[in-house]
Amino acid sequence: MGVWQSYRLRLQRKRWRIRALRKRRELEVVQDRTADITPSDILVFSTLRNELVRLPYFLEYYRKLGINHFLIVDNDSDDGSREYLQEQPDVSLWTTTASYKRARFGVDWLNWLQRKYAAGHWTLVVDPDEFFVYPFCDTRPIRALTDWLDASSIKSFGAMLLDMYPKGGINDTPYRMGQNPFEIASWFDAGNYLIEKNKRFGNLWIQGGPRTRVFFNDAPEKSPALNKVPLVKWDKRYTYVSSTHMLLPRGLNLVYDEWGGEKASGVLLHAKFLNTFAAKAQEELRRRQHFAGSMEYKAYAEGATDNPDLWCKWSEKYINWRQLEILGLMSKGNWA
């Protein structure tokens, strides 16, 4: 990378950090339990709106992995999400009625909270429908992973977003509050992914899966990105640029081996396609708070009217992380 490009990225990082500093004024404290955070705690950061039905399982899942504290921004929920989270003993909660879009889709809010509370901590940034899977997660807590990353001097850990879906129409089976969503959405695409390198930021750009073949079949280049760097040993100098797709400094995005080997990586199981999907798509289309005029949610709203069946003859039923490694969707690298 040239000197001029490096300089421009440093300026951009400074600009995003200043922007996050300004956007902190949009956040109002609902419940601040950050005094309970100890230096060794592993933290989850998330922003959400109207996700009450998902929250019990989301919190249970990450508590079992070994997450110690949740720092959450509620973007003007009216379904009881804020009240529910306020009562959770390991949650610090902020609320805002400000524009999600003008906060760069929540990135500014979380960048500020991470700058203030996450320095020196391993932090996991996930949405309420994203569930982190890593090598040996069935037998080892997340601290085993972060301890190994620390010992290996690795500061960031990549994960591919893997869209999960049911067999049959997505509206056919109701999802109940507290339920494991993968009892319903237990299938995924084992292939059908395109990968290219983002030359500016150094990250891989991944697209494909059921969202491309069903909702963006006519324009696959516009389908959502599936590459994520959700787990980072945070430093005040860091900043997310676009969701968790990429960070600055750009070295944090190099979570893959360019020379033919394999670095350890994980997967985020994405439980978007439940019977709640159609109503959520309509709500977000009305709000128009997402990227490119909510183009993604326009495609979802149009496609969801016919109760689509995302299952196809190439679909695989999820078993465990070892299956995902065999399929090449994640890797344990040299972590034994």
Image (cartoon, rainbow, N blue to C red):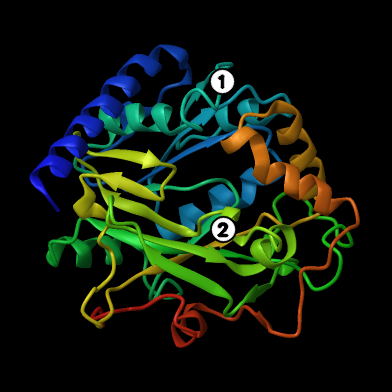
Q: Residue at x 11, y 49 (%)?
A: 2
Answer left or right for 61 relative to 306.
left
Residue 55, position in %: x, y?
Answer: 62, 44
Residue 193, position in %: x, y?
Answer: 53, 72
Residue toward you, 138 or 110: 110
Answer left or right for 92 relative to 20.
right
Residue under label 2, please give it.
221
Q: Amino acid at mark 2?
A: Glu
Q: Residue at x 66, y 41 (%)?
A: 295
Q: Is residue 91 visible in this depiction of the protein?
A: yes
Q: Is residue 161 visible in this depiction of the protein?
A: no
Residue toward you, 36 or 110: 110
Residue toward you, 233 or 58: 233
In front: label 2 or label 1: 2
Of mark 2 and mark 1, the one earlier in the sequence is 1
Extreme-left residue of the structure: 3
User: What is the distance, in whole Å, between disc 2 and disc 1 at their CAs?
Assistant: 27 Å
Q: Amino acid at mark 1?
A: Ser
Extreme-bottom residue of the structure: 326
Mark number, residue 18: none
In the image, is residue 3 above or below residue 79? below
Extreme-top residue of the structure: 25
Q: Residue at x 58, y 46 (%)?
A: 128
Answer left or right for 316 relative to 99.
right
Residue under label 1, please give it.
99
In the image, is residue 212 above or below residue 35? below
Label count reads: 2
Badge 2: residue crowd in 10 Å (few <14, some 14–19, many ≥20): few
Residue 319, position in %: x, y?
Answer: 59, 81
